[in-house]
Amino acid sequence: MPKQTKQSLIPTTFYDQARKSRRSLYWLTPVLVLFLYLCVMGVFFWLQQLQSDSVMFITIDQETRQQRLFWVVIALSLLIVLSLLALWNYTRFRTRAEAALIAETSFRRAMENSMSTGMRVFDMDGRIAYVNPAFCRMIGWNEADLIGRTAPFPYWITGRFEQHQKTLDILLSGRTPSSGLEVEAQRRDGSHFTARMYVSPLKDSNGEQIGWMTSMTDITEPKRIREALTAAHERFMTVLEGLDDAISVVADTPEGLELLFANRTYRRFFGAQTVGHAELMGNRLSRFADQTLEIYSLSAERWFEVQHRSLTWTDGNKVRLQVARDITERREHEEESRLQQEKAQLTSRLTTMGEMASSLAHELNQPLTAISNYCMAAVAMVRAEQARPEQLIEALEKTARQAERAGKIIRRIREFVKRSEPKRQVVSLLDILDNAVGFADIDARKRQISIQTHLPRATPYVVADPILIEQVLLNLLKNAIEAMEKSDYHTLHVEVAIVNQYVKVAVIDRGCGLKDPERLFEPFYSTKSEGLGMGLNICRTIIESHHGRLWATANPQGGTIFRFTLPYTEPKDTHLSDESNEDYALISKEINA
């Protein structure tokens, strides 16, 4: 089986090129010498033949000498032929060796010329002994300008010779780090570039060091990109570290949560631990949810507005991003605003009662006068000894009814003006309307105005604070009664309807109408000379806090129509009011704590 030779990966090697170009040259010299030898021998034999033809007789000694000479010539000829063969073989071997050396040198030169890395050789004295074309292209100087040069070199930056000399001393002393050196150089056109230089000792075939081999790679563009990325990262980190929001990123691992990133605000509240992140996540550890919640942290003793989001981390895995904003001060301000609003609402109710004091006094005076008259009549009959039991019972029953009437008025006033915590519950809007109309009717009768209600067949229920909604209704009814005082129409209409899951209430008067409707709900704006301008503003705040809406429009028949809406609910949905009250109680308790 023929022996397979190892084929080169390069299709046409330099060795093949050298063999093809010199294959017909190495045997010419031996062949030419052999040809000349044969010519000489032919001439020799030709001369011998002429001599033998011209001499008639030859002695024995001469013949012997002639034969000896012939064999000597033959031996010498054979020796010459062998020498020529040996010379031919040696010439062939030497030619092949030279071809291989030339091919290897050409191959190495081709590799050096095709490299993008600049190669440079210093001898032991710091003199440039070799540069490849890539190095010349890198700095813009020719090979003839660099070979044999010593410091300072033409590619050194002007004004930094001392720094370059220190780098050269480190190179020649063999103290260059294995990671290389970052150096700056100057091209022939004056432009600068940054390169990464690696240094290794150059040794001869005997293992003795004869110089230093350096390789340089232009890293100007990679360095610029790296510096740009570093600057962008620093700017991004500066922004994240400067945020007032606590930002953290965690990953789910078999051992639990792993904190991947936390900014300064998070570390200030919770440290470099995942406890704060887990606490603010609550019961949402098993799912990714993009939502915003307000959570109270027991460890930080602060309120946070927390937003969670899932994202893909640099390793391709899903992680949890959490942004927590400290809203403690905002909650405190909201609580203070709520307390101030309650005070304003209480003041408004007290003002309303004050404005209705004369009417209430007149209303209370009637049952009290009746009670007094019935009691005096009973006393008179007893003293005259003419009292019969049935007469006394009738008088006492009438007295009790009048007392109950007076007590009901006083109870309504007390419930209306007393200061209590807001409590939302599922209530019938008709009950609230009945109480408000009962109050307003006292003043309406005094002004000879009747209040007519238009109610739906089904009883509308809402989740509301009955005292606050009663305050809104009473304020609207009172304003309507005052507006109709000089009107020829003496009936005030109140309509209640259920429209699209909302309960709509309309107070329709035929008074003087609206003068400046766009400013009607502004604070401290009033159309009455003695008004404070806070009633309607407080009413709108109350309705909006119940997720409703209050607005006013002109009545086509003259006057004004005030309307407000409240979300409709079913009587069985009492859990809505319970949850609302529990949330309010929890918030108040945690803020006070």
Image: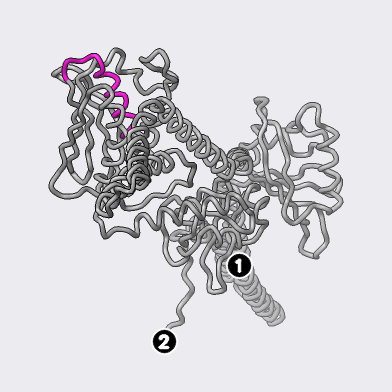
In the rendered image, the vertical position of residue 41 relative to residue 145, given as above or below: below
Q: Earlier in the sequence, mark 1 or mark 2?
A: 2
Q: Mark 1 points at which residue?
A: 93
The three-letter amino acid code for the residue at tag 2 is: Met
**Residue placed at 52% from the left, 35% from the top?**
340
Which element is circle 1 on? helix
Q: Mark 2 points at which residue?
A: 1
**Residue placed at 15% from the left, 37% from the top?**
454
Specify whether 509 is left or right of 264: left
Specify whether 182 is left or right of 514: right
Residue 163 lies in what quarter of the image?
top right
Give the percent coordinates (x, y) of residue 236.
58, 41
Range shown magenta: 473-489
**Residue placed at 78% from the left, 56% from the top?**
201
The three-letter amino acid code for the residue at tag 1 is: Phe
Q: Is residue 530 magenta?
A: no
Q: Residues within 10 Å of mark 1 (few under 14, many from 20)?
A: few
In the rendered image, the vertical position of residue 84 relative to residue 334, given as above or below: below
